[in-house]
Amino acid sequence: MVSAQSILDFPVPEATQVVSARDAILYALSVGYGTVAIGDEVLKYVYERDLVTAPTLANIVAHPGPWMQQTGVDWTRSVHSEHRLAIHRPVPVDVPLISRSRVLSVVDRGIEKGMFVSFERLIATADGNQPVATIVQTNACRSDGGCGSAGSSPEPLSKVPDRKPDFEFNIDIPENAALLYRLNGDLNLLHVDPQAARKSGFARPILHGLCSFGYVGYAIVAAIDPSMATGLSSIAARFTAPIFPGETITLQIWRNDVELRFRGLVTLRGATILDNGIARLS
């Protein structure tokens, strides 16, 4: 059995990457940019001339890879539980980037329920060390409970308002969404292989959590500012249920000036797939 302290002390490797225009465009296409009529407001994200990188692109940049497998946890039973992204500046193209990561906490939920592991990734330019993004991710390791707890957990995301949302609209997720998104580098078989999905407890391959996260980030900006001139300075949410390719997300938004609270539903299944969401406009 793994121990909480050994996971907390695990030296997550640094990672480097130079993001190309092709990388940025592929990511944008994989999270919904260009799925409807393509005007100038969207073209700038999917065309290398005067390219603008998508706000949530940092999620896939300079990723340290599947390091958690090396800690001894059952990676096949691990799922993304919560994600927080703070955007310090748009991801630059053709600039060397570096990420430095560390484990923040391990929270034991008991042998039957598993544990939560939260870790932080700081992305910066490799030369001038200018900050690009800060990411805090929490994984639910469903087969590794009873290991004890260690570290300091992130503050819980607060609940969305208990009133009717200010906006509500649908986001259609294409059937091939997971197949396209995995080309960004997340090749976890859970999202493509039916047998691997069943082994993990799902009837069929599920969508990457960060794919739905990217779709929601794009949809929030497009809904608030159709010109897409507004950006995001941060976005966070809890993944509360899986979503499958081909489903429709009903996104509910509560607005308070530049702060937006949101929740994502799949109404056909009566499922809340994203909850306690919060985004801030830049």
Image (cartoon, rainbow, N blue to C red):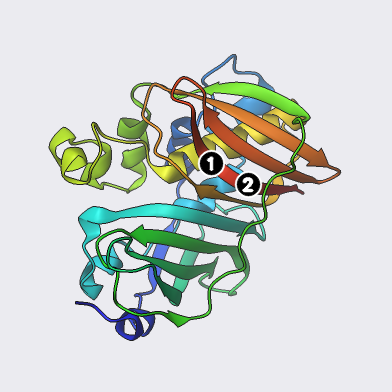
Q: Residue at x 43, y 24 (%)?
A: 269
277 to 212, vertically: above or below: below
Q: Could you say where residue 25 lies in the image, as x and y percent from the top left?
A: 48, 36
Q: Count residues near mark 1 (Cα–Cα under 10 Å), then give few for <14, some for 14-19, many for 20+.
A: many
Residue that extends furthest to the right in the rendered view of this protein: 257
Of the residues shown, which amino acid type is indicated by label 2?
Gly
Q: Quadrant of the N terminus?
A: bottom left
Q: Could you say where residue 128 lies in the image, as x and y percent from the top left?
A: 59, 74
Where on the picture, by quarter, is residue 250?
A: top right
Instruction: Tell me how many marks there are.
Output: 2
Query: What number is the disc on residue 274?
Result: 1
State whether residue 181 appears in this view. Answer: yes
Q: Residue at x 49, y 55 (%)?
A: 82
- Taking the image as shown, residue 7 lies to the left or right of residue 249, namely left
Camera-side residue: 50 or 270? 270
41 to 157, vertically: above or below: above
**Marks 1,2: beta carbons within 8 A:** yes
Where on the picture, by quarter, is residue 23?
A: top left
